[in-house]
Amino acid sequence: MPHDRNQRRDDVIIDVKGLRNSFGESSVVHDNLDLQVRRGEILGVVGGSGTGKSVLMRSIIGLQTPDKGEITVFGEPTIGRDETEATNIRKRWGVLFQGGALFSTLTVAENVQVPLREFYGTLPRSLLDEIASYKVVMTGLPADAGPKYPAELSGGMKKRAGLARALALDPELLFLDEPTAGLDPIGASAFDELIRSLSRTLGLTVFLITHDLDTLYAICDRVAVLAEKRVIAVGTIDELLATDHPWIQEYFKGPRGRAAASTQEMHGAEVEASRHPTEVEANRTGERSQGGQADNNARGATHEATGTG
Ligand SMILES: Nc1ncnc2c1ncn2[C@@H]1O[C@H](COP(=O)(O)OP(=O)(O)OP(=O)(O)O)[C@@H](O)[C@H]1O
């Protein structure tokens, strides 16, 4: 069921204050890290390899106990809660881990049913099957994907199956760790669109870790940048570009960043043109189909350059 879209968009859904995480004395990953995620936004989280994006996500969802700091989700503290309280909070979010993390011995439908069984115990078989079928179709998988095993699916289908499982409990909040890694450019674009459309229709808040600049440009409302053990900046891409931090400048203004920006510009022009059909008719000279090709090429170039697939 869609969540209440009338609630204030500036409500803070995730609030991280003064977070410190370390693995041994010499390996401090986060120090005094602050971050707020607002209701209904898609927040992209970027940073160099090893800057602690996944550890941050694990801290928020309670899989990593920080040395210091406070984390609240939906206004509830998540650290140090008893099992029942923690479970009640966990029910309200879904997680797509890096690589999908499907159980290889379970079918897609059974994978989707895992959180339902975990959080609601025994449910009638017919209800479990009905919910699984609904989630499978919702994520754009063919209806006959339910009885298939992960090994029988393409990379893109595995991601969708992982997303179907993350959506099993009708979450308000979705955590996605590098969802487009390993997908070809067209598959990655389609997955971006799926996330955006689910987020809009279901009123989801999305915490999205990515190395994919196209994803940032295409679907993120704001982007948080991890560096120097903390979030050094958070804002729209334009706001980030206005900062003078060297890593941010290099990231967004380097060749990959420029390719992603021009892809997005092309998309913007196409969307604009589609709003003015008469002009489109007048200009129908094949430019758009060339634009579409360039679009895919840009994403391909970006992926090639980043090595993120
Ligand atoms: N369980 C662990 N034990 C020891 N060190 C860990 C553990 N988990 C993470 N680390 C270390 O914490 C640092 C941050 O890891 P993390 O996976 O969060 O980085 P990341 O920003 O997500 O990187 P990438 O973009 O490469 O996925 C790394 O140096 C990693 O080796």
Image: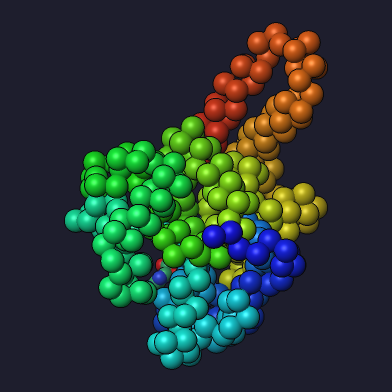
Q: Point out residue 202 in the picture as x, y percentages from the top left corner.
A: 58, 56
Out of 269 and 68, give the one closest to the viewer: 269
User: Dividing the picture into quarters, in which one does residue 45 lie?
Assistant: bottom right
In the rendered image, residue 99, in percent from the top left (x then y), is placed at 37, 53
Frontmost residue, 48 versus 192:
192
- Considering only vertical position in the picture, is 184 above or below 276? below
Query: Which residue is painted at 46% across and 36% down in the image?
Result: 187
Q: Nearer the viewer, residue 57 or 125?
A: 125
Q: Position of residue 237 (x, y in %)?
A: 72, 50
Most foreground residue, 100 or 110: 110
Total number of numbered labels? 0
Q: Is residue 98 visible?
A: no
Toward which corner of the image does residue 307 lie, by quadrant?
Answer: top left
Looking at the rendering, in which quadrant would you find the N terminus?
bottom right
Residue 127 visible here:
yes
Q: Answer with left or right where residue 234 lies relative to residue 132.
A: right
Q: In which quadrant will I find the C terminus?
A: top left
Residue at the image point whose x is 47% and y is 80% from the top:
88
On screen, residue 149 versus residue 33, left or right, reads left
Residue occupying the far left of the picture: 105
Identified at 70% across, 8% down, the residue is 285
Q: In the rendered view, tell whether residue 146 sits above or below residue 288.
A: below
Left or right of 272 in this view: 145: left
| Residue shown at the point (40%, 87%) measured from the top left | 83
The figure's colour scheme reads rainbow
Image quarter for ligand 1 equals bottom left
| Residue 186 coordinates in the image, percent (x, y) | 49, 32
